[in-house]
Image (cartoon, helix red, strand yellow):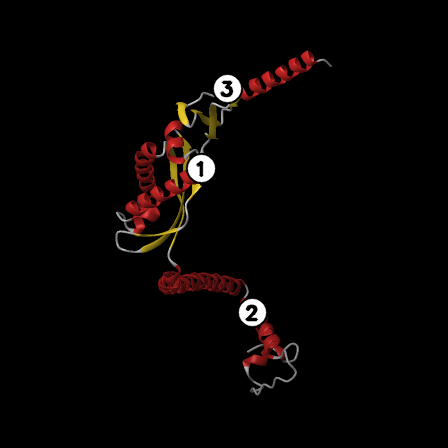
Amino acid sequence: MGNRSLLLLSGGLLLLALLWSSIYVVPQTERAVLLRFGKIVEPDIAPGLHFKLPYINTVRRFDGRLLTLDSATSRFLTLEKKALMVDAYAKWRVKDAERFYTATSGSRQIADERLSRRLEAALRDQFGKRTLHDVVSGQRDELMAQVTTTLNQTVQNELGIEVADVRVKAIDLPREVNRSVFERMSSEREREAREHRARGRELAEGVRADADRQKRVILADAFRKAEDQRGEGDAQAAAIYAEAYQQDAEFYAFYRSLQAYRESLASKEDILVLDPDSDFFRYLEKAGARPR
């Protein structure tokens, strides 16, 4: 290979290297600024293919997606001076690429540290204005909205970022008061349980008393109906006996005597001491005798 060919090849490779170093791509998920000797010349580069001057221009990229800041658990005081351990997080994104680079040099770690301090201050301020009930349930959504608004007013101008949302993951009592609170809650629950049991026993006694009363009423009514029906049956039986007696008095007397013999002499161990001339034996006399 001649010197001319070697020179052309070297020039081509150099040109290719310069062309390659002049081309850069900004994805949709990133934000970027173009620097010239460390000074920003293009504050917010649009996504796509771009060109720059090699060794003169520098491109600084940083994540443009929605990011999450997990704040460390902090101790806050409520309006009534009750201590709470609060664990929160914030969702944020880069809004002003130039301001973000100027304030943090494009470092997410620096942005997280500064945003974390601002978040803690905003939460401390909002918790200090509310009671324990408000921050736990009553005004929790309102508190989060106000913290988000307060943060945006601060960090947009200072850091060039936008806070999309702030949420509290957990609110706990400090360890030193957890046990006392638990014991107080336990005693309250035991008191409520005793009240419920006493009320249940009172209701049970009322139900039993009412059931006993209904039982007595039902039994009395059933006894009355049974006596009525028994009286009606006895009356009908007496009427039937009277009618049978009127039809054949002698046969009726004989039949009743047989029933009396059967019932009185049913057992061999029975002993009857009677006058032989008693009417009880008149049907046991000799055949042909006339009953008296």
Going by the numbered disc 2, the residue's amino acid type is Glu
Q: Position of residue 178 (x, y in %)?
A: 39, 60
Residue at 55% over, 22% down: 21
Residue at 48% over, 21% down: 47
Disc 2 marks which residue?
250
Compute the Cα span from label 2 to label 1: 129 Å
Q: Position of residue 40 (x, y in %)?
A: 40, 25
Q: Secondary structure at mark 1?
A: helix
On residue 108, the disc is 1
Q: Quadrant of residue 197?
A: bottom left
Mark 3 surroundings: few (<14), some (14-19) or many (≥20) residues within 10 A: few
Going by the numbered disc 1, the residue's amino acid type is Arg
User: Which one is in front in this view, the residue at disc 2 or the one at disc 3?
Assistant: 3
| Between 72 and 209, the one nearer to me in the picture | 72
Q: Secondary structure at mark 3?
A: strand
Q: Position of residue 58 (x, y in %)?
A: 47, 25
| Between 173 and 266, the one nearer to me in the picture | 173
On residue 48, the disc is 3
Furthest residue toward top: 4
User: Which one is in front in this view, the residue at disc 2 or the one at disc 1?
Assistant: 1
Going by the numbered disc 3, the residue's amino acid type is Gly
Mark 2 surroundings: few (<14), some (14-19) or many (≥20) residues within 10 A: few
Q: Position of residue 215 (x, y in %)?
A: 42, 63
